[in-house]
Amino acid sequence: SDTPDSATDVFGYHCAYYSISPHTWGLQDDGDFTAGTMCCGCGGGQACSDTPDSATDVFGYHCLYYSKNPHMCGWADDDDFTAGTMCCACGGGEVASPSTAVIIASVLAGCLLIIGVVGTLAWRARSHK
């Protein structure tokens, strides 16, 4: 999902704008808003899944509809469907937490990078004696 929902660019646009106009990302960033890291439409945000998949709005549309039409978020909510809390494109959904395997892989990659740098520095020091 896009993060954080309250931040806006210099013209007051939220990430939903960049879902329909991704070609403009980065041109309107400001002190509290960076589209490239905060908005899913620009390759940023957090991994998200829509919830629940079976619920639909008053017209029978699922969250997939809103991923292509984020400007429609909230217009057709009903008793069992609220786009703003259920659909990633509307700022809702469930943010996935990284799995233990991903965390371990990240830590190991960082350690290998450090070992590689230290090894390279040691090799350079030995070769310049």
Image (cartoon, grey):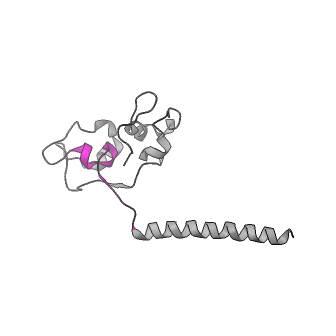
Residue extending furthest toward the left: 79
Q: Which image quarter: residue 99?
A: bottom left
Residue 80 versus residue 109 in the image, above or below: above
Q: Residue at x 77, y 71 (%)?
A: 123
Q: Which residues are magenta?
A: 81-99
Residue extending furthest toward the right: 129
Q: Nearer the viewer, residue 42 or 96?
A: 96
**Residue 54 left/right relative to 15:** left
Q: Position of residue 12 (x, y in %)?
A: 40, 29
Residue 107 colored magenta? no
Q: Residue at x 40, y 39 (%)?
A: 15
Residue 30 versus residue 36 in the image, above or below: above
**Residue 79 left/right relative to 64:** left
**Residue 21 left/right relative to 127:** left
Picture quarter with the C terminus = bottom right
Residue 127 versus residue 34 in the image, above or below: below
Q: Position of residue 11 (x, y in %)?
A: 44, 27
Residue 90 colored magenta? yes
Q: Position of residue 4 (x, y in %)?
A: 38, 43
**Residue 98 left/right relative to 78:** right
Q: Residue at x 36, y 60 (%)?
A: 97
Q: Position of residue 87 (x, y in %)?
A: 28, 48
- Total numbered labels: 0
